[in-house]
Image (cartoon, rainbow, N blue to C red):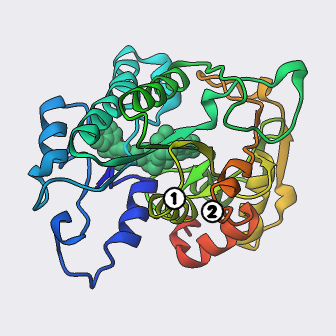
């Protein structure tokens, strides 16, 4: 079962689990039930319990639930109290509801979290971040995601897979890659933050990784999975211009202080793949190769 099936990650999970020519089948026959927000609001306790107990499929419920639903408007959560309440309901409470229902039907839950839950390393050190590095969420979104992790662990101690990722872009909706491509067509130069470091992650690669994890015998735990290597937002923007055949030097670097945003962003979000490899899983492809592959497969990421 996939929740949040209409999002960037959710749609890539669905593309892999239900190819267009696959016969429609409920989970009783080993099939997949993928639900968008319109089909299952994960904040509705009764609907969640009913859905996970088989109400949306044929049979007793899923073996594995992949939760791709989230409230991801991080700046709105910081400035709009209603959005903050939504962020808490979707990112903190709903994972607990889903996990409790999974416990009732004996399902494993694969839950996606974020680099934002992590804090700075002691002494300002800079090395790829491990799952047991100190947490230190700043802002509404970050705190809500950490609370979601905690609820999943508590409800499903023996059957959770929590995967923290970062800088995700997918084929649907607004994302950094699409925004930069649009701005590059509108302006001669762009100014982009160059002092935040992270690992851009193509949603399709993350979907492949989550499915490999779900099919593995990995013990329950919290792991990191993001595109290989690291860059800055400025570096990613320059790579987008390269993919467009444009001059990447049109992207000028600036610092975070010159581009204030409502929600704080971590300056260092580079995630280590050691926990992923230790589970016997293949690391996600290097971020730069992944960007090229994504725009070849989805040319609409770079709109005319
Ligand atoms: N995007 C990133 O840069 C990033 C970075 C690190 C971690 N993550 C994590 O990665 C996961 C996937 O994120 P994404 O990038 O795929 O986000 P996304 O594109 O915003 O997708 C989230 C999906 O969840 C749905 N949703 C929201 N509220 C819901 C509700 N009450 N019930 C059911 N569905 C609901 C959204 O529907 P609507 O569109 O209708 O609201 C959307 O389809 C999330 O856990 C996110 O926290 C993302």
Residue hosting label 1: 213
Q: Residue at x 50, y 26 (%)?
A: 141
Q: Position of residue 256 (x, y in %)?
A: 78, 28
User: Residue 247 or 90: which is nearer the viewer?
Assistant: 90
Left or right: 272 as drawn, with respect to 281: right
Residue 186 seen:
no
Q: Image check: 165 left or right of 289?
A: left
The residue lying at 45 percent from left, 55 percent from top is 8
Above/below status of 194 relative to 108: above
Q: Are marks 1 and 2 in contact (CB under 8 Å)?
A: yes
**Image vertical order of residue 181 relative to residue 82, above or below:** below
Describe the element under mark 1 as helix, strand or loop.
Answer: helix
Task: Name the residue: 66% across, 62% down.
Answer: 284
In terms of image quadrants, where is residue 148? top left
Q: Position of residue 274 (x, y in %)?
A: 74, 50
Are there few (<14), some (14-19), or many (20+) residues within 10 Å of tag 2? some
Q: Give ligand 1's quarter of the image.
A: top left
| Residue 239 lies in quadrant | bottom right
Q: Foreground: 16 or 54?
A: 54
């Amino acid at each position: 079962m996939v929740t949040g099936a209409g999002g960037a990650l959710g749609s890539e999970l669905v593309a892999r689990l239900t190819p267009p020519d696959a016969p429609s089948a409920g989970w009783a026959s080993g099939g997949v039930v993928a639900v968008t927000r319109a089909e299952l609001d994960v904040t509705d306790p009764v609907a969640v319990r009913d859905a996970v107990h088989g109400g949306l499929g044929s049979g007793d419920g899923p073996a594995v639930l992949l939760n791709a639903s989230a409230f991801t408007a991080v700046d709105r959560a910081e400035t709009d109290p209603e959005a903050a309440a939504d962020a808490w309901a979707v990112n903190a409470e709903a994972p607990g509801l889903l996990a409790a229902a999974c416990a009732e039907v004996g399902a494993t839950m694969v839950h996606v979290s974020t680099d934002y839950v992590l804090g700075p390393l002691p002494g300002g050190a800079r090395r790829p971040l491990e799952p047991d590095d100190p947490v230190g969420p700043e802002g509404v979104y970050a705190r809500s995601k950490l609370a979601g992790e905690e609820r999943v662990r508590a409800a499903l101690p023996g059957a959770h897979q929590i995967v923290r990722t970062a800088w995700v872009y997918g084929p649907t909706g607004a994302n950094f890659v699409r925004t930069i491509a649009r701005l590059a067509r509108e302006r001669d130069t762009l100014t982009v933050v160059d002092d935040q470091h992270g690992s851009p992650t193509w949603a399709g690669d993350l979907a492949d990784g989550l499915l490999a994890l779900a099919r593995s015998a990995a013990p329950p735990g919290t792991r990191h999975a993001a595109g290989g290597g690291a860059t800055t937002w400025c570096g990613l923007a320059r790579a987008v211009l390269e993919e467009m055949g444009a001059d990447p030097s049109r992207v000028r670097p600036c610092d975070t202080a010159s581009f204030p945003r409502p929600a704080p962003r971590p300056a260092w979000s580079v995630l280590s793949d050691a926990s992923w490899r230790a589970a016997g899983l293949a690391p996600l492809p290097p971020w730069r190769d992944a960007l090229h592959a994504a725009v070849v497969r989805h040319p609409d990421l770079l709109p005319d």
